[in-house]
Amino acid sequence: MRADAVRGHLDGLLLAVLESGPLHGYAIIAAVQERSGGALELRTGTIYPALNRLERLGLLRSSRTSTGQRERRCYELTDSGRRGLATERSAWREFTTVIGAILDPGEAT
């Protein structure tokens, strides 16, 4: 899959993997990779700026946790983030319906 395939959908991907509960950055990357069957590999240079932006927008909140001697920042959805995820899902369904009608015109939905 092309590296730019997630462009425009990164926020939705991040919100979706955080729906089940708080995760730290590397766990978010692993969750996206696992849920995509290995097709998507996000880089830390992509994910952390996006997480920080989503936090500034109030869609996520973060807290610091310690694991042994290592401190990690865990991210979780806010109520606004849950609403944002619902909006992202709705937009995705609309997008795939429209694009599908063009790419696969014989497939009626």
Image (cartoon, grey):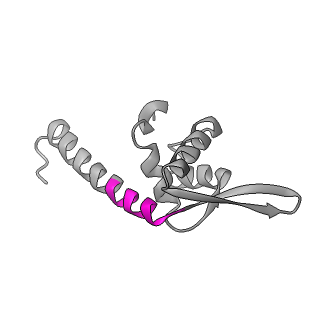
- Quarter of the image for residue 47 reads top right
Residue located 51% across and 43% down the image: 40
Q: Which residues are magenta?
A: 77-87
Residue located 21% across and 40% down the image: 99
Q: Is there any visible trace of residue 36 in the rendered image? A: no
Vertical relation: 14 (above or below) 103: below
Q: Is residue 71 left or right of residue 93?
A: right
Q: Is there any visible trace of residue 63 in the rendered image? A: yes
Q: Please say whether residue 83 is one of the residues in the magenta stretch.
A: yes
Q: Position of residue 54 (x, y in %)?
A: 51, 49
Given residues 54 and 72, the one toward you in this image is 54
Say which quadrant the C terminus sits in: bottom left
Q: Position of residue 58 (x, y in %)?
A: 49, 55
Say which quadrant the N terminus sits in: top left
The secondary structure that most of the magenta stretch takes on is helix
Q: Is residue 27 left or right of residue 20?
A: right
Q: How many marks?
A: 0
Residue located 17% across and 40% down the image: 104
Given residues 11 and 54, the one toward you in this image is 54
Given residues 79 and 106, the one toward you in this image is 79
Residue located 64% across and 40% down the image: 44
- Quarter of the image for residue 74 reads bottom right
Q: Position of residue 59 (x, y in %)?
A: 48, 56
Q: Please say whether residue 90 is one of the residues in the magenta stretch.
A: no
